[in-house]
Amino acid sequence: RDRVDLFLQPIVSLPQRKHRFYECFSRIRTAEGTLIQPQEYIEVAERAGLMAAIDNLLLFRSVQLVRKTQKSKHDVGFVCNISPHTLSDSIFLGEFVTYIEEHQGLAAKLVLEFPRKDFLAHDAATAEALTRLLQLGVRFSIDQVDDLTLDIDALARRGVRFVKIGAAALLNELRLDTPSVDPRALKASLDRAQIDLVVEKVESESDLIELLDFQIDFGQGFLFGEPRIAKEKA
């Protein structure tokens, strides 16, 4: 019934705080116009077999938004989350590869974001589609990083160019005398692999000041802007 809305949250470069990307989120409206948050609808949508449809709608609306920003010459990219449902849908991925092949100018502005565990566990058909998207210029990001133990070389080989880690997880390790994983060594390894670090859920200036000493690349969180509905329906 066309009640899936596109919301955008800025991702800023640091320390300049310049808007470099927008992460795309879906929100569903009731008939009365009340927004339903993902934590409220995902379980129901999964049971009804609708998650792939919601994901696909979000992805193509994000791509349409990329096309609009190209016309206005806004130099920003868009990050679109890909759920396990879409990642395992070989038919949809094949169609999406074909679409990007026909509109290659969109690829450089598009970042596909995957949960860490799902990205590392996909099958051969998915791997082939992702490899083709990489060749076309689409970049990959991983999120839901539950711990800081990362096989950075393996991520780089698979085309990951952004790793998203929560501010609390980094700050907890930075404040320990003997951290389980040295965040500074982790950042140096990411730099060598040409992978940018995005710190999400940055909520306060005091946390940001501490994180800036760590020389992070990008920040995301309510400190920089909350998710807002796209001005024009994509």
Image: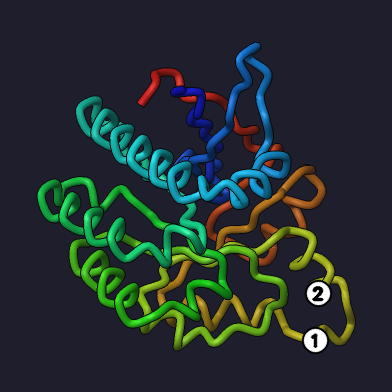
Observer-nearest of 24 and 149:
24
Kind of element beneath mark 1 = loop
- Find the distance from the CA under tag 2 to the CA under tag 1: 7 Å
| Residue beneath disc 2 | 173
Number of marks:
2
Residue 177 found in image quarter: bottom right
Which of the 4 image quadrants contains residue 37? top right
The residue to which callout 1 is attached is: 180
Q: Are marks 2 and 1 in contact (CB under 8 Å)?
A: yes
| Kind of residue sitting beneath label 1 | Ser
Q: Residues within 10 Å of mark 1 (few under 14, many from 20)?
A: few
Residue extending farthest right: 177
10 Å crowding of disc 2: few (<14), some (14-19), many (20+): some
The kind of residue tagged 2 is Glu
Residue depicted at x 54% and y 87%: 151
Residue in the picture at 72% in, 83% down: 182
x then y, percent, for residue 34: 68, 18
Left or right, 202 with reference to 133: right
What's the image's color scheme? rainbow
From the viewer's perspective, is 140 left or right of 99? Answer: right
- Can you give x and y, in whole percent of width and height, for residue 90 in the image? 31, 66
Closer to the chain start, of discs 2 and 1, is 2
In the figure, is residue 51 to the left or right of 203? Answer: left
Check the image and name the residue furthest to the top.
32
Residue 135 x, y percent position in the rendering: 20, 69
Question: Residue at image x 82%, y 83%?
Answer: 179
